[in-house]
Amino acid sequence: MTAEQRAERTRWADELCTKAYDGTGVPETGVALVAVGGYGRGELATYSDLDVVLVLDDGVEPGQWAGDVWYPLWDSGAAIDHSVRTLSEMSTAAVGDVRVALGLLDARHLAGDPTITLRLRTALHNDWRKEARARLPQLREVVGDRVSVTGELAHAAVPDLKESTGGLRDATVLKALVASWLVDVPHTELEGARTRLLDVRDALHEVAGRATDRVAPEYWSDMAKVLGLEDDTTLQRSTRAAGRRITHLSRLTWSRAEAALSRPRTSAVRRPDLQRVAPGVAVSRGEVVLQRDARVAADPMLLLRAAAEAAERGLVLSPTTSARLVREAPALPDPWPAEARDLLVRLLAAGPGLLPVWETLDETGAIDTFLPEWEQVRLLPHASVVHRWTVDRHLVQTCIEAAGLIRRARRPDVLMVAALLHDIGKGGLVEHSVAGEPIARRVATRMGFAAREVDLVGQLVRRHLLLPEVATTRDPDDPATLTQVTAVVPDREVLDLLATLTEADARATSDQAWTSWRAGLVHSLHRRAAASLTEGEDPVPEEEHDFEVPGKVRRDPSSVFVQVDDSDDGAQVTVISGDRVGLLADAAAMLALQRVSVRAARARVVDDVCLSLWQVADTGLDESVLLQRLENIVEGRLDARERLSRLTPARIEPTVAVRPEASDVSTVIEVRAEDRPGVLFTVCRALADAGVAVRSMHVTTLGPQAIDVFYVQETGAGALGDVRASAAAHAIRSGLLEAVSLETPGAGT
């Protein structure tokens, strides 16, 4: 009904303007009355202004009639925004301000000489297309400035239907991008979302009784009645869905526009280049797409692999690719294989790159294929006004915040999944942390987590409000306050993860939710609870490995043995040789040079023989090729250090810590670094260069983070002294910082 009402309002305004124009002594040629902006587009709401311009040919001088046009409009009571300009002045104004150009691109003839309007539109559109390469960066800057202060229509607590990201202003910008002829947008989808927002704005004006674009919380219920909807939740979700759709189209179109601007001008039509970045996945013109020979019907992990690559690289996940994978790729098995779980964690831990990729997954229905529970919180408004976003957007932002804190987590995979699911129980009648725990446990089980990790995820979801509630509402000096935490938190691992999740959750909520005061209270409670839970704990014993020494190694300890055993989701590479400083660095180099992705590794020295077991993501590895590569490295025919001298740039600085409490016979060095090819080699090489013997190695790759723990000793002796331990840790950190192109800070470790 509202579309017809807008059309009727536009007809009334057109008749009013035409009558006012015809009642004056305006020359028959060289002058036209033109509608611009929202009036030019025929989008008048109940209280919209009439934006009109009296346009004169450059040779026409305005007379008394130029002012007489406005009197009937004023007398009618209509709100008008009017001006008198020549054709040249209109073009100059459009060139001088990209925001003016946006409104003038929609110029529509009302009365007078139609050739003036035609010349105006032709000149404006020709200039816009001709100067697109210079004007679009200016427009992008204007859009960015607005977005930084207005929030997202789809997720903001108090959305602005016009100015918020995904609002009517962005829809207008998209039409301007199409007018540049550099890109296109799906017209039907854009118009459907834009029309929905126009309908909602009409209802807002009727309820508010004035011109406004901001939807205050108290308006939703009455607006739903105006639009004939069952309740305000239905209206909020449909409105936010339209905003999300425009946001998605806007981000995608801007990415493609910027890619088009970066390409040199050429008339030749070239086939898009495809750069392979992962099995079945490639990059083309700034978007992650499928390789031409991708085995879509045989690879259930292709969707998560493409999404993770796009998020980590800060690229667009092609909606066409995502939609095709939803249609054609097989479902993930239940439970998931380890690779699928690792890919999801990589996606969640990608930082800011997660948001646009997650939106693409949501828009194309991909999330429902691996996380159907998401429907419960999709576009769900928060009941609390403290929250700046809807529940689903808050969960994504919590993952983004947690990614920045990931160095604190001993189990970053558990942290990221808990961040995604901590509010999954909202939307029902039961307290959301209670309702969310069984859902989170079910999801974690389906994802293939072991029982301990499932329990961790469940406890984090159930207790994610514990620390802030106790810290801010209880007397910290009362012994019962500490007991309130330790009575329900079973161990230090849960507590530490809970503290990190608490901070990520609060930072994603609002600035007021994580003030220095609140942070201090939570950190103080965490420290006291950690001290209480740590009392009496025994160190984790070092692992033992029973293995048979191959005959070639017994006869010649300097020789190396390599064996590959494939499994359902990867392979185990076994390396055995006589123990020596640098052996593990050589084995790590062997795998890095082959571009093999290491998920986990263990090493142990028994009776002067070193066994290392490497769990890798690849299958079908050739033992003979690996053995030859390792022998070349060991015998000096291949310089691995030169080949692996620099890693791809890291987003998070590595940390190296000496853990004196972890062993009585060895020095324990813990390294946390962003997982990249060659990281493990860099660490092992630094230890070898320091002349330190590795007695045991425990390496785990969890999502984007590699956690490498080394039990080291002096060659032929025991634990390192404090100075030697500090020097070894510093050497590792310096080597990593140099390799990932980060500036090495002071001498600390």
Image: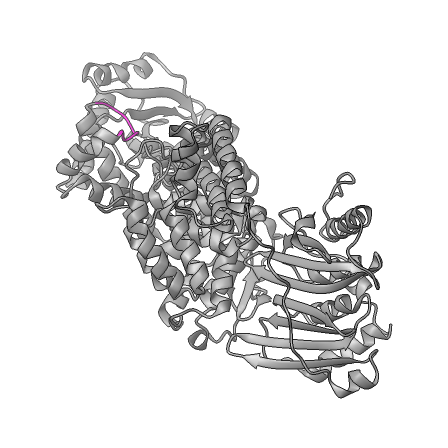
Vertical order, 170 against 619 (above or below): above
Q: Residue furthest front?
A: 536
- Which quarter of the rendered picture does the N terminus lie within? top left
Judging from the image, the colouring scheme is: one colour
Inspect the magenta stretch and tell me whether residue 214 lies in it: yes
The residue drawn where x is 53% and y is 52% is 350
Magenta region, residue range: 210-216
Q: How many marks?
A: 0
What is the x, y in percent for residue 66? 33, 16
The residue drawn where x is 23% and y is 25% is 47
Inspect the magenta stretch and tell me whether residue 164 lies in it: no
What is the x, y in percent for residue 504? 47, 41
What is the x, y in percent for residue 188? 31, 53
The answer to whether residue 120 of the structure is visible from this angle is no
Q: Which of 278/577 is in front?
A: 577
What is the x, y in percent for residue 529? 49, 40
The answer to whether residue 621 of the structure is visible from this angle is yes
Q: Residue furthest top?
A: 64
Question: Which secondary structure dominates the residues rendered in magenta?
Answer: loop
The residue drawn where x is 77% and y is 38% is 746
